[in-house]
Amino acid sequence: MEYPVFICDDDASQVARVSQIIKSAEVILSDEETVKFNLVEQAASYAEAAAFLKANPLDGGIYILDIELGKSVSKDNGFDLAEQIKRQDERAQIIFFTTHDDLSIITFRRRLGPIDYIVKTDDLDVLKKRLTKTLEVAIYQLSKFNVMKEMTFSYKVGRNIRNVNIDNIYYIKTTQTPHKLQLVLKDGQREFFGFISKIAKENPMLVKISQSCIINPKNLENVDTKNYKVEFANGDEQYYSRSVAKEMKDLIKQYNLKNASEVSKFNGLFKH
């Protein structure tokens, strides 16, 4: 797995040490899965870092930030940069470097939620152990976030974001109103504006079966390959496109579903 890393520190020697440790951490943390840290950029000032991240926003990045940019905790420091990062990257993993160990109250008040504060030291071994452990925590947090995101479907109603568990979804289909979609759940229905193709792309656990419908295959009751339709546990039926016929047969095997047309054929033979 590859993780983008961004470093902002005005101490060139510190950046060199951190970069060296990051490389060695790849080997240490590569166990069942190969870990690669991709150093996308390093900056020496708030302005330089802010400009780069605005033009090149990261998703699920690891950010190693010096709090005292310019040798002081004044305006345009590591805290300010972290606030911008949090607005851009909801999965951001922030690691603060500092010459002080008493700045945690500031991050608490500003709700920055870093995964660690590391006090700068010239002891390379101490720094290596601490940063490697912190990078391991970052990887764990990102993997946990990814699992939660996969299991959650989010949609917007007005200015509000609504979240539902993917397992609670039967299907999402278009309505007669342009761009208005109907979300059919185990416990009811919702309507919101969106695009079927975009939702399918952003939610890999859902399957697009036609230009007008996305389904949760986990909640299928059976598939009728003769009539090109699927049935859900609540009795609802939706038709699927002939172009996805092969994919539907794969779903039958993957989820051990009943094939309604095969059951009908078998019953006909049994009666004779």
Image (spheres, rainbow, N blue to C red):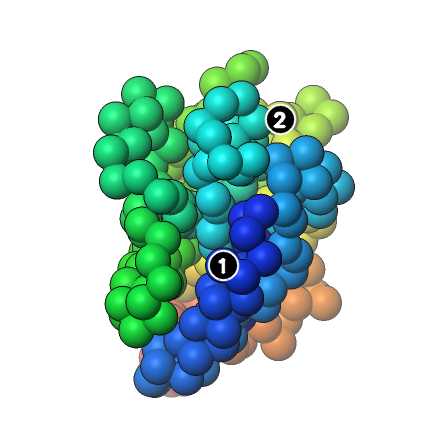
Residue drawn at 68 percent across, 34 percent down: 47
Check disc 1: other Cα within 10 Å, few if <14, some if 14-19, many if 20+. some
Mark 1 vs mark 2, foreground winner is: 1
**Count of numbered circles on the image:** 2
Q: Is residue 3 left or right of residue 128?
A: right
* Viewer-closest of 188 and 163: 163
- What is the three-letter code of the residue carrying label 1? Gln
> Is 268 located above or below residue 122 in the figure?
below
* Viewer-closest of 256 and 85: 85
Kindly indicate the quadrant of the structure image that contains residue 6. Answer: bottom right
Residue drawn at 27 percent across, 67 percent down: 126
Residue tagged 2: 193
Residue 130 screen position, x and y as percent: 28, 63
Residue tagged 1: 14
Residue drawn at 32 percent across, 67 percent down: 123
* SS class, disc 2: strand
> Is 163 located above or below residue 120 in the figure?
above
